[in-house]
Image: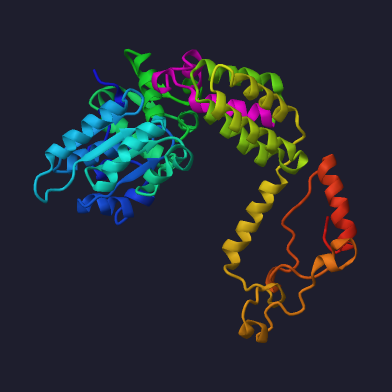
Amino acid sequence: MLPLAERLRPKTLDGFFGQKHLLGKGAVLRSMIESGNISSFILWGPPGVGKTTLAKIIANRMERPFYTLSAVTSGVKDVRDVIEKAKQSRFFNNAPPVLFIDEIHRFNKSQQDSLLGAVEEGTFILIGATTENPSFEVITPLLSRCQVYTFKSLDKSDLTCLLDFALKNDFELKERDIEVIENEALLRFSGGDARKLLNIIELICNAHHEGKIIIDNQTVTAHLQQNPLAYDKDGEMHYDIISAFIKSMRGSDADAAVYWLARMIEGGEDAKFIARRMLILAAEDIGLANPNALLLANACFDVVHKIGFPEARIPLAETAVYLAASPKSNSAYMAIGAAQEIVQKTGNLPVPLHLRNAPTKLMKELNYGKNYKYAHDFANNFVEQQFLPDEIKNAQLWQPQNNPAETKTKEHLKNLWKGRKNY
């Protein structure tokens, strides 16, 4: 018998759970699919949110050839074979076939290059699915010819609806006496992943061959502790382990960071994926407390590109230990968040006249740039003047945190501004 997740895979857009911003009534992606006039696009999002399912729905709707490749098992030869089949299937003015590539981020540059000409010439429409940021993993010429649609993790409402649908509509589950008393643990362990949710339900039901099945927080937790890999596709703990790795470095535990790094390496994780996550952590969680962390993380990213495994494990470990041991600050991360929030609330506030560029005579006559004070003309290369729009001139967005580097910076700025900024 097919697994529950496969039995409940929707066949139409109306049966699709989640992604209302793209697939709800009148949404952009749904409208394109329903029109039948689709263009190349890439679906980016975490596992279990419906990327492959949507491709299968499109395959069912399109009255044209539909080819599927998995980037895990397919090479350049497979791509060329599909391109040749696509060319042979084109007659007169009929619509081009569709090629769906799952996990397209696993294609290397030469494999992606082999797709480029066919996409440019309209030999087929390309649909790619990826769990990785396409900006990093898809070559620029190919990415420029594809619209990227971001799929989100399913929210509590989506998962609750899916749970209710499964219990009422699956031919196996509706024959069982199942009562859901609590769903908090079920939703939490699912992590926004529809497949995980259904796998957990199936795991619990398979453990009870007869009698009433009670689903509550205790039952869910107990079953998953006994079967820690059961709710992951093929035992894949990719996202859980990278989360543990990041949190260990953020929590300054170098031993745990190296352990989770080893787990990823032994599991065949891409070295660039690991290095990229450390780059993000260096900026977000260490930041101004130790600016050298970002430099080392960037050097590590460059090195693993050049040498690959097995040697890449050494700079990866060096960087992981360094990041874990570094003092931490997220002040820059908080500052840009606060600044974006102000921009969203206040819109496009005018730039103060004295800060405006004045390349023309008219602009100078309108006082663009007038009364601007050039900092280097003053003592200590500083002069007090207003740099924010009038409406928010007193806003303080960067709040230094308590570490030696930022304390030093804070004192420097405090001396410059003579206490006029609240450092």
Above or below, comparing residue 122 to residue 360 in the picture:
above
* Magenta span of residues: 221-250
Q: Residue at x 28, y 44 (%)?
A: 119
State the residue in front, 211 or 236. Answer: 236
State the residue in front, 201 or 352. Answer: 352
State the residue in front, 265 or 259. Answer: 265
Q: Is residue 128 left or right of residue 252?
A: left
Verify whether residue 269 appears in magenta.
no
* Quarter of the rendering occupied by the C terminus: bottom right
**Residue 410 location, x and y as percent?**
84, 51
Q: Residue at x 35, y 28 (%)?
A: 71
Verify whether residue 241 appears in magenta.
yes
Q: Is residue 132 left or right of residue 371?
A: left
Above or below, comparing residue 150 to residue 413 in the picture:
above
**Residue 124 location, x and y as percent?**
23, 42
Q: Main secondary structure of the magenta part?
A: helix
Toward which corner of the image does residue 126 lie, by quadrant? Answer: top left
Q: Is residue 402 left or right of residue 300?
A: right
Q: Specify whether residue 184 is in view.
A: yes
Above or below, comparing residue 408 to residue 1 in the picture:
below
**Residue 263 location, x and y as percent?**
56, 17
Toward which corner of the image does residue 327 lie, by quadrant? Answer: top right
Toward which corner of the image does residue 8 lie, by quadrant? Answer: top left
Q: Specify whether residue 50 is in view.
A: no
